Amino acid sequence: MAEPTQVLFHPAPPAAMAADVRRGLSERLPTLPSKYFYDDRGSELFEQITQLSEYYQTRTEEALLARVAEDVMTRQSASELVELGSGAGRKIGVLLEGMGRAGRAARLTLFDINALFVAESVRALAARYPDVPVRGVTGDFTGDLTALGPGGGRLAVLFAGTIGNFHPDEVPGFLSRVSAQLKLGDGFLVGVDVVKSRARLEAAYNDAAGVTADFNRNILSHINRALGADFVPEAWEHVAFYDDANAWIEMRLRANANCRVRIPGARFERTFRAGDEIRTELSCKYSRGTFARLLPGTGLVMEQWYFDREELFALALLRRVHLPLLRLA
């Protein structure tokens, strides 16, 4: 039985969170980085969201992955899987089983911002796959990728359409940083939510049970706990809408009344008037063409684009072919 590696912690220092919050809330349209959704409560709420009838992404991606995993593993002779933003670590098992059927030795790294989910997933996957060494890394994968160490026989994966949480201008830089942790021939499998009807998209972010609304407001609770802020989450309304011009969903929180918010840990305060909004998330939607246009200079090329049968969601298999040309920081 392989012993799972201890979970390694690379958390962002409190000063980094404070700087992110201070900078974001100082903007003309105040913003909060969506990575701060994922404290313990937020991570639990997101797992609930994935089970909702309106939220097609998770079940569609899981079915697509099951269908194409054999082809992915045929194209990618990987011996190491690295899941970025691993959450509960469910989908990675499909690829691990594909590697096992191919008779390959496998090792696994889970990389997520939430320490509890990383630790639980490492334990669960180590028990389920006792011959697979499992390593957990806790940190912000948008900036801490060097914690992975050098590649070589590596397939990195980023599921759940998480790539859409980056502004499109930020995607090439992120892909370059991933590419820098891969060797020539290594791969990156990316879940991509695709452009579809406004009704289908907006329903997924405005579920009837209100779980997404609770998830959205929880970011304020997280900031209260972490930075001593005095947000009243119940005084903010969940807003989510599709922007056709930019092909993205925006999630926002709208103040229901005038308020003055103080955030001692960020040395910041701001007055919000009733109706003022804070943007908490972008979720960009792509076609094959618009996603492919983000790849030049990153060191990655698209090897395969997999669609589900309804063309609701895609998996893009990228291959490292040369050093990234873009600045990595």
Image (cartoon, rainbow, N blue to C red):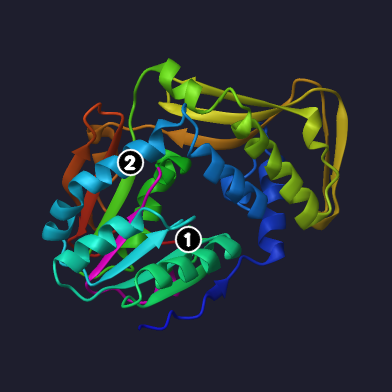
Asked if residue 298 can be seen in this view, the reply is no
Which of the 4 image quarters holds residue 310? top left
Q: Magenta part of the protein: which range?
A: 146-160
Mark 1 or mark 2, which has the lower sequence index?
Answer: 2
Which of the 4 image quarters holds residue 251? top right
Q: Which residue was labeled with disc 1?
A: 141
- Mark 1 or mark 2, which is nearer to you? 2
Task: Measuring from the top left, give residue 220's x and y in whole percent.
Answer: 73, 42
Task: Measuring from the top left, give residue 245's x and y in whole percent.
Answer: 42, 20
> Which SS class for mark 1?
loop
Position above or below: 45 against 199 = below
Task: Measuring from the top left, give residue 54's x and y in whole percent.
Answer: 47, 26
Position above or below: 290 against 180 = above
Q: Give, as a three-letter code, the residue at label 1.
A: Phe
Cα distance between the residues tagged 1 and 2: 21 Å
Q: Which residue was labeled with disc 2?
A: 61
Tell me, yes or no, whether the highlighted magenta stretch contains residue 157.
yes
Q: 252 or 62, which is in the foreground?
A: 62
Tell me, yes or no, whether the highlighted magenta stretch contains residue 145.
no
Asked if residue 174 can be seen in this view, the reply is yes
- 195 lies left or right of 34: left
Q: 292 or 56, which is in the foreground?
A: 56
